[in-house]
Amino acid sequence: MNETVVGLDEPSLAEKIVDQVDRQVSIPNKENLFFEVLKILNENTAENTVMNNETNHFDQLISKDGLIVEENAVSWHEALEQLSQPLIKQKVIEPRYLTALKQELPEIPPYIVFRHQLALPHTEPEKGAYGVAISFGVFKQGILSTTEDPIHFIVLLASNNKEKHIDALLEIMDLAGRDAVLSDLLACKDKDEVWRLLRLYRINYWG
């Protein structure tokens, strides 16, 4: 593990650890293991660094341009392109960040999908991330993952600071398990409706 995870942030490191464990033993619930590993890594970071006490909620990292409501069927890479453009315009990522995502994620792998419903594509900041921001996409037709699950929600995360996105990441993972909220989001007709629902969810559950 030391040879493969140098320089990775906590979520990427947690993914690597879960993947390595899964190769050795059968894991009944990989998502729960990911949560537990991520909490351990985050606690370790908190013990060894001076943390910023400011909470960065996920909706605060999304601009209105960063909301996508796609009615038509699109491919996985077309979805990544749509979600990347607002972040490129904001100069949060370079175009090469999108190129890296396409190369590393030719399909939707199970390790970035939470509760079989929400995909969270991201890569290392060295691939062209210069800030912390999120694009949130609702894809009405769904995009099949490698496990044949139709993915309707894709959250593209760009971050050059692991301390600023950890709270937002945990909120997004929680959102993936809120079936009622996701059902309402899927029924939204435009960005304004999506924005109101996301903000209402965050306020109700996270303050």
Image: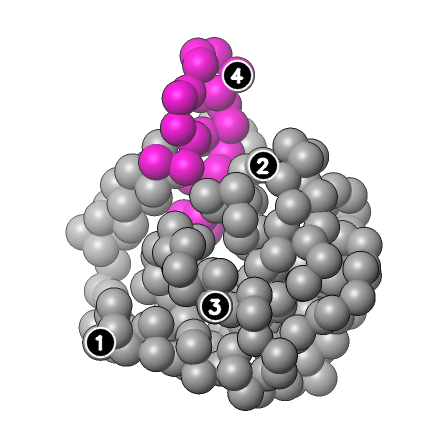
Q: Earlier in the sequence, mark 2 or mark 1?
A: 2
State the scheme by which the image is colored: one colour
Q: Main secondary structure of the magenta part?
A: helix
Residue count near mark 1 (Cα–Cα under 10 Å), binned few <14, some 14–19, many ≥20: few
| Image depth: mark 1 or mark 3 in front | 3
As for residue 18 lying within the magenta part, the answer is: yes
Amino acid type, callout 3: Asp
Residue count near mark 3 (Cα–Cα under 10 Å), binned few <14, some 14–19, many ≥20: few
Q: Which residue shows up at 52% across the image and 42% down it? A: 116
Q: Which residue shows up at 43% across the image and 30% down it? A: 30
Q: Nearer the viewer, residue 139 or 173?
A: 139
Label 1 – label 3 distance at C-alpha: 20 Å
| Image depth: mark 2 or mark 3 in front | 3
As for residue 157 lying within the magenta part, the answer is: no
Q: Specify the segment rendered in magenta.
A: 5-32
Image side of residue 181 versus residue 125, left or right = left
Label 2 – label 3 distance at C-alpha: 24 Å
Name the element at disc 3: helix
Q: Earlier in the sequence, mark 4 or mark 2?
A: 4
Residue that carries the numbered disc 2 in the rendered image = 110
Name the element at disc 4: helix
Q: Earlier in the sequence, mark 1 or mark 4?
A: 4
Residue 20 in the image: state x and y as whole percent.
49, 23
Specify the quadrant that holds the C terminus: bottom left
Question: In the image, is residue 32 above or below residue 1?
Answer: below
Amino acid type, callout 2: Pro
Q: Is residue 193 visible?
A: yes
Label 1 – label 4 distance at C-alpha: 39 Å
Q: Which of the numbered marks, if any, corresponds to residue 207?
A: 1
Q: Is residue 100 visible?
A: no
